[in-house]
Every structure is written in C-alpha cells, then in structure tokens.
Amino acid sequence: MTVFIIGVVTIVALLWLLAASLANESDAEKRQVRQFYFVGEEGPQQVSYTETKRAA
C-alpha cells in the first residue's frame, strides 16, 4: 500500500510540475510578443530585438 501511495504522489507532483512549466512558457511567449511591438501614440511600432545566448 505504501508503494501505491508513493507512486500516486509522484505522478501528481510530476503532472503539477508539467502544468506549471507549460504555464510559465505561455507567459514567456506573451512577454516576448509584447517586447516585439510597442504601442505608442502614433500607433504600433516595431521594436528592434537583439537575440542573446542563454544557458539551457
């Protein structure tokens, strides 16, 4: 019975971690889209984007 409980807790934790990771990725995409375009008084203008290298 103990092994069953440990398995269920582990699966629930992994699913929660997966859901949290996907939610953070969605937020990152929204921030990136906002970074590309800036809406000013004259209307939408494209903002220059410099790609940086990040550690994985």
Image: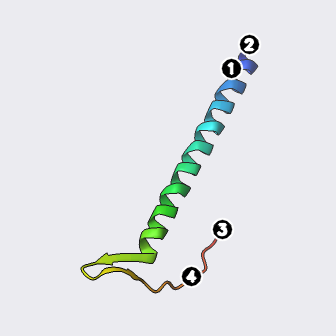
**What is the total number of numbered labels drawn onto the structure image?**
4
Going by the numbered disc 3, the residue's amino acid type is Ala
Q: For residue 19, which quarter of the picture?
A: top right
Q: Is residue 13 above or below residue 30?
A: above
Give left or right: position of 56 versus 1.
left
Element marked by disc 4:
loop
Going by the numbered disc 4, the residue's amino acid type is Thr
The residue that appears at 52% across and 63% down in the rendered structure is: 29
Q: Which mark is residue 5?
A: 1
Query: What residue did someone put label 3 on?
Result: 56
Q: What separation in Å lies between label 4 and label 1 (alpha carbons)?
A: 44 Å
Front residue of 27 and 11: 27
Going by the numbered disc 2, the residue's amino acid type is Met
The residue that appears at 74% across and 19% down in the rendered structure is: 4
Query: What residue did someone put label 4 on?
Result: 52
Front residue of 5 and 17: 17
Who comes first in sequence, dot 4 or dot 1? 1
Where does the image place residue 49, in percent across and percent down from the top left? Answer: 49, 83
Q: For residue 6, which quarter of the picture?
A: top right
Q: Is residue 19 above or below residue 40?
A: above
Where does the image place residue 44, in percent across and percent down from the top left? Answer: 36, 78
Where does the image place residue 12, in percent across and percent down from the top left? Answer: 63, 31
Give left or right: position of 53 versus 47.
right
For disc 2, the neighbor class at 10 Å (few under 14, some 14 to 19, many from 20) is: few
Q: Nearer the viewer, mark 2 or mark 4?
A: 4
Element marked by disc 2:
loop
Element marked by disc 1:
helix
Where does the image place residue 55, in percent across and percent down from the top left? Answer: 63, 72
Q: Is residue 39 above or below residue 12?
A: below
Front residue of 7 and 51: 51
Q: What separation in Å lies between label 4 and label 3 (alpha carbons)?
A: 12 Å
For disc 1, the neighbor class at 10 Å (few under 14, some 14 to 19, many from 20) is: few
